[in-house]
Amino acid sequence: MYKNQIAELIANTINSADFSAETVLSLMIPPKDITLGDICMPCFKLSKIFRKPPMAIAEELAAKIQKPEYVDSITAVAGYLNFKYNAEFLAKKTLTAILEKGENYGKSDIGKDKTICIDYSSVNIAKPFHIGHLSATAIGAALYRIYKELGYNVVGINHLGDWGTQFGKMIVAYKLWGNEDTFKGGVRSLHALYVRFHKEAENDESLNDQARYWFKQIELGEPEAMDLFNKFKKVTLDEVCVLYDRLGVTFDSYNGESFYNDKMGEVLDILNEKGLLKDSQGAKVVELGDNMPPCLLVKSDGASLYATRDLAAALYRARTYHFSKCLYVVAYQQDLHFKQWFKVAEKMGFDWAKDLEHVAFGMVSLAEGSMSSRSGTVVYLEDVINKAVEKAYDIIVEKNANIENKKDIAEKIGVGSVVFSVLTNNRIKDIVFNYDKVLTFEGETCPYVQYTYVRCNSILEKATIGDKVDFSVLCDDTSKELLRYLSNYPNTLIDATEKNEPYLVTRCVLNICQLFNKFYIDNRIIDAPEEIKNARLMLTKAVKTVIKNGFRLLGIQMPEKM
Ligand code: ARG
């Protein structure tokens, strides 16, 4: 807050080519002793240039710099130049801006003219959309919204897993044990066929031969094979889109792996031209040096691989969207895969290779136990969400049986809590999901934030904000800290995109909630004298606004009552 302006003031006063405002900014830190001020600049580096002790320099600067209205005091202490903000001025400025901008507070156009591709959620056809996909979906969608909020042109891509020999197996299984009703049973029925195939193939090797035959038919575009393949796809997407709707998740492209079938030839041609493709026991690989295993791009039977498709997809995205960053929100288990093909892209000489980024995240498992897609014990994300919503419903009934729109409120709390669970900590952390923990109203939880929002709402319903405002009552430590988070919210969004970490937004809002609740306990609002009441109501409204704006970007809705 005002850090840039202060840096500029200092730089102008120093007036030396060696000390730009940017350099000053990089030196500025919060003072060790917060009673000294809100921000300070150590003068030790200046001492070398001006051949004076840092203490003298700090004193000279303190005397010379013209104090702006947002600063209360400028002091020199032990070689540090300290600035103390004028709390009243800042309170007024921050609250006025938030109330004026409302739902646009935090929006900016710093991303104007830049395109960000985000590959996220990336569903596998005919396979369960399980709890493991939660992070890929929630983190990706949050980044999508945050980048958009900052004015970037964002392309959300669902890189469907719609290619591979498993579709040959699916056709065999369907023809043997399935019928039209299978499709009515959705992905669960399709997946049951897949599980059955593996069981039966243990005793009957011919099934695998048939599967290879049918996969070949898909590759050749044979009508019967294509018809079934497309039905598998439709069933999966219809089902997952219902969930996307509930989560408020959208995509601009569903170009999946099969889309690149005719686009890998070019990649292989370039690799050949550059002499990068090496034979290895009949397969083709690119060697990546001592630190990484070679990247396999063509199998000995001529089939392409996951990495081959990713290379073709990246080339297509670079040409189609001219991205300034292309993000892959994918579990850390695929670390090596991304490292390998990013390196291949770099070796191919694509200048966009440096703009590819694997946004990795940790594992999510249910407290009850993990899962495997082969054995069939899968925890569907849909079931987790439904169960969370049901539990939320019970909690609401218990807390307030007469409240209207219980279903709607339960949906917001339940869905929100599931999403929140993967957006609370930095993304690389593994998570064990526990219903009771995520649904409690206390601690760092989604219902806690929603409850705080509702609290703001009910305060604001009871009074209107008048014109006469005494901002000086917002200068106590809690209010000052709260105002600092509120005014820093727009920067938090930028931070979140620089690190691709949506949890920074979650943390900012959580801190705001905690501070506001403390403020609420310590202060009377509605029955305070008029000018004080107005200041406190403005603060309440600003808190409400930032909670709602921040959590909307994370994909979490606020109930108006609960
Ligand atoms: N479908 C893949 C999986 O579930 C994730 C795809 C990620 N995107 C990509 N371009 N590789 O593992």
Image (tube, grey):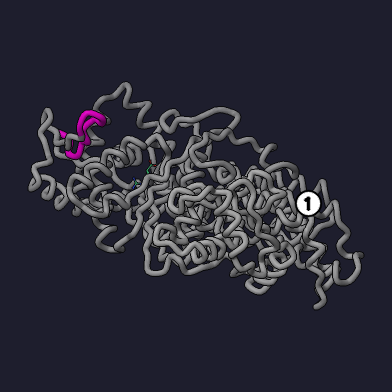
Q: Where ligand 1 lies, by image quadrant?
A: top left
Q: Where is residue 344 in the image (x, y as percent from the top left)?
A: 22, 43
Which region is colored magenta?
289-300
Closest to the observer, 529 or 408: 529
Q: Can residue 258 be seen in this view?
A: yes
Residue 292 located within the stretch drawn in magenta = yes
User: For residue 115, what is the image quadrant?
Assistant: bottom left
Which residue is rendered at x = 44% and y = 28% of the image? 375
Closest to the observer, 369 or 214: 369
Which residue is rendered at x = 17% and y = 48% of the image? 348
Residue 34 located within the stretch drawn in magenta = no
Q: Position of residue 128 (x, y in %)?
A: 45, 41
**Please, is residue 201 above or below residue 520 in the view?**
above
**Please, is residue 132 above or below residue 517 in the view?**
above
Q: Which quarter of the figure is the N terminus placed in?
A: bottom right
Q: In this view, does 26 lie to the left or right of 481?
A: left
Residue at the spot of label 1 = 517
Closest to the observer, 505 or 385: 505
Going by the picture, which residue comes out furthest to the bottom? 467
Amino acid on which disc 1 is placed: Asn
